[in-house]
Image (cartoon, coloured by chain):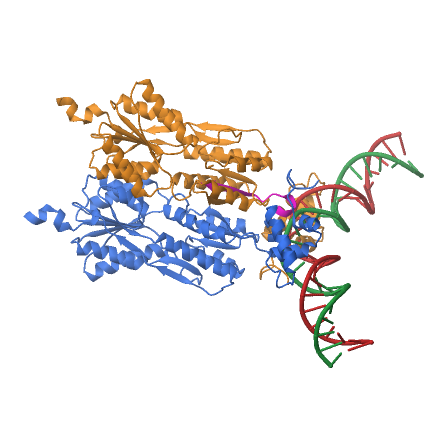
Chain colours: A orange, B blue, C green, D red
Amino acid sequence: MQPGKKNKKVSIRDIGRELGISITTVSFILNGKAKEKRISDALTERVLEFVERINFKPNMMAQGLRTGKSKIICLMVEDISNNLLFAKVARYIEEEAHSRGYRIIYCSTENKKEKATELIRLFQDRSIDGYIITPPEGIEEEIQSLINDGIPIVLIDRGLPGLSCNQVVIENLNSTYEAITHLISNGYKNIGFVTLDSNQTQMTDRLAGYQKALDQHHLSSFVKKLGFHQTTEQNVHEITSFLNTHPELDALFFSTNYIGGWGLQAIKNLNLRIPTDLAVVSFDDQDLFRFYSPTITAVEQPVQAISKEIIRLMLNALEDNDTNIHQITLPAKLIIRESSLPATVNDEHVFFK
Amino acid sequence: MQPGKKNKKVSIRDIGRELGISITTVSFILNGKAKEKRISDALTERVLEFVERINFKPNMMAQGLRTGKSKIICLMVEDISNNLLFAKVARYIEEEAHSRGYRIIYCSTENKKEKATELIRLFQDRSIDGYIITPPEGIEEEIQSLINDGIPIVLIDRGLPGLSCNQVVIENLNSTYEAITHLISNGYKNIGFVTLDSNQTQMTDRLAGYQKALDQHHLSSFVKKLGFHQTTEQNVHEITSFLNTHPELDALFFSTNYIGGWGLQAIKNLNLRIPTDLAVVSFDDQDLFRFYSPTITAVEQPVQAISKEIIRLMLNALEDNDTNIHQITLPAKLIIRESSLPATVNDEHVFFK
DNA sequence: CTTAATGGCTAAATCGATTTAGCCCAATAC
DNA sequence: GTATTGGGCTAAATCGATTTAGCCATTAAG
């Protein structure tokens, strides 16, 4: 039995038959090699016009089989649904990729090494041209093996120390430093830092930025590291305990937007006023921070710029065979809102003490 | 020149050569047809063991070319980044699809007919096995042509009246009816409805549910329809004007979560207290509503159930050639929070009047 | 007038799988 | 002793493109 659908689609062969020419000629013309292969302008014109009229699209599987290129890029993120940042990157990348003839498949690693490995193996059959990855810890070997196979990779959101690979990240250290300095200059002295128990570069850099700012002002640090893969309730509870054990805290920095969400929850449960009782700044902006009462100061990632760089690096590697390694670091922006207003203005105790 | 990467990958032919058997046999075994084709258990065992050991994965392009199936499903949503609902659906679907050997490519229509048409045409080369689509208005013909080609389609979030096609939607009418009834029974009498100027079924059904509840209690309706593709500022401004022109409003229903966001913005700008001055209920739950002060009552879509049905319908059609049309309608749940507390309890005027 | 160059096009191999048709041998039936 | 059956395996066609090598005129060069 022949494979294929009810409506047999036309092939390059049908076009050749219809126009009385060889499939070779059709292929050359469709691939823009008419001039190079000295096909006459008249014929080129005729073929292009015909192809346009019948809305012919070459079969990608056949093309892929022959050329070894699938025109598919894999976007492998932590979880496309738990961080709007990834969904936004997905959105921007999609547009540019399509306009260049690429499709994007996505998958989520849950930031687990095993899951990521499994996914990479699942796709390892020549059917993915390039990978855009937020790498979980411990995935170095697997990535290296892709690189060895000559497959373009762009790491995003975080790097893998010890691996030379294209990457697009932001200035985590500097932007956190700036945020903490902002709190300090607004009069806060006991600033807590709530983060994940993770050795990934974006997290360690943010912590380093915090530490750097504190050191510079000789302030002591209060760091709470939340375990990975806990429930929201557990996390909120841990932040609540952290605040209870350290009543001296007058400000809190959350190292990601979802930690920010848990933090606000905890603060609400404790009935603390922001920023009167506790100032708040979070990494990663989101609707919640813009709309919350009070509005929450946040470090905003330049999503559009990040996405542009990601797809630029990928297409460079794919189309221009650029094998140089590009490591791009983009600046992030502190959006100052109500939650970090100067302590002296808001805290009436200061006036009357 | 030969195509292919630096590390030439092994093919079914290499396996045959290595084991001294034909590629036919290898293919039969790999496709689980060993029994049917009477390949001896010993040989089957030997091949499977070898394939496992060298971690062989058949080339999908070759498979696809031969079988006419790409094992790729296209998820075509409005915008994967502007509504977490779509990202969540994407996440759930991904898991199940992968476990069944399918990959998912995504794309965003911006809810525009032209964009959707363009995308469908872009993919129309036999390289997509099925489509999961949130259809924009006016896309009926294009969808029908896919159906005619025998390609499985599942419409989601909204249907296309006049088109018989698989679909998974929720009880928009009933759940809105329930939400409005909830407001009415909590003492609200002048309930406004802010929605999009759209004829899509999910929107018209929500409006119908609102109308039904009002009619039943002989209340008058206040409907504000926002234009498509306006800026956030414009929308917030329009909602503000709506509230100003109708000072009698004591409650507001937002027909989507992002409209809810704009609405909260408008209410905040007007310094109205929720629910004292104005009760609020929104369709679609989100973090913002859970964390806001006060917390916002919302109609929650059963994302997981929706996703399960979507992928179930799709895989049924793909694998079991189920050509029956399934139209699934799932219930949604009203999550009652602070923003819709009874008017009489909160509005002290009522007590002292 | 022969050879070389060029223009315009094509036959056939190839990518890596699936699938049809059928080969060969041993066992059983008649 | 021949015909039939079935077990165990394989050769070759095929999917629809790309690409190499080369055919056949015509013109230019020597």
Residue A84 pos. (x, y %): 38, 40
Identify whether A256 is placed above or below D12.
above
Q: Is residue D9 left or right of residue B340?
A: right
Q: How many marks?
A: 0
* Quadrant housing residue B205: bottom left
Q: Nearer the viewer, residue C30 or B189?
A: C30
Residue A295 drawn in magenta: no
Question: x and y percent of residue B62 in the render?
Answer: 62, 51
Q: Which residues are magenta?
A: A64-77
Give left or right: position of A125 versus A257.
right
* Residue A314, image x, y percentages: 53, 36
Which residue is depicted at the point 49% across and 60% down? B317
x, y percentage for residue C3? Answer: 89, 36
Visible residue check, residue B159: no
Of residue A215 and residue B88, the one placed in the foreground of this image is: A215
Residue drawn at point x = 34 percent, y = 28 percent:
A334
Using the rendered image of the protein, determine whether residue B63 is visible from the camera's viewpoint: yes
Q: Is residue A74 within the magenta segment?
A: yes
Q: Nearer the viewer, residue B174 or A174?
A: A174
Q: Is residue B251 above or below residue B161?
A: above
A32 horizontally vs B178: left or right: right
Quadrant, the N terminus of chain B? top right
Residue A159 falls left or right of residue B11:
left
